[in-house]
Amino acid sequence: MVNRKISHAASVLVDARALFDRALSDNLSLIAMDILLAVASYRPDSDGVDADAPTVKWVFAAMPRSRRGVRLQFNRLIENNLLLVEASNGDRRSKRVRLSPSSIQLFEQIALIVGGDERVHPDAISPSHNGRAAGQALPIADSPRL
């Protein structure tokens, strides 16, 4: 018999993965999931300008995969309004990556699953809305392809 903690951890991961799969409907790739996880878990080294968001360069360096595969998935995440890319306030040549409102909603749903909250609705993230809940407006962003 499997340990209860292991069984619970596996169940949480399976549910979280199902949310990612629905949100990343046409990006069914672990690379896309890794990119979102890297941006969401970013911890700055300092408290400088834009310290709350990683640079594009940092995101690519954090990926243990080929640059070409990362670039393809990164651009798809931007096209599907799951990531926002903005010019840095401190250095206009540098670009910062932020989670979009759709991605923030995805992580809020995952947080509910991890917290054991039964209020999570399995269809909260739907591929027919590219990661947005039904009725939620498209996030407006000036996020160019890289």
Image: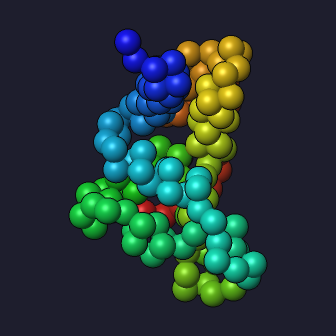
Quarter of the figure with the C terminus = bottom left
Which residue is rendered at x = 56% and y = 16% of the image? Answer: 122
From the viewer's perspective, tell me whether residue 142 is left or right of residue 144.
right
Residue 116 at least partly seen: yes
| Location of residue 95 in the rendering, given as x and y in whole percent from the top left corner | 55, 75
In the image, is residue 90 above or below residue 117? below
Viewer-nearest residue: 23 or 139: 23
Residue 140: horizontal and vertical position, in percent?
65, 50
Q: Residue 102: x and y, percent?
A: 61, 40
Residue 106: image quadrant is top right
Q: How is the image coloured?
A: rainbow
Q: Which residue is located at x 51 percent, y 18 percent?
A: 4
Could you say where residue 107 lies in the image, as x and y percent from the top left?
A: 61, 39
In this picture, residue 3 sits left or right of residue 29: right
Which is more toward the observer, 48 or 118?
A: 118
Q: Is residue 135 above or below residue 61?
A: above
- Residue at the image position 46 percent from the left and 66 percent from the top: 59
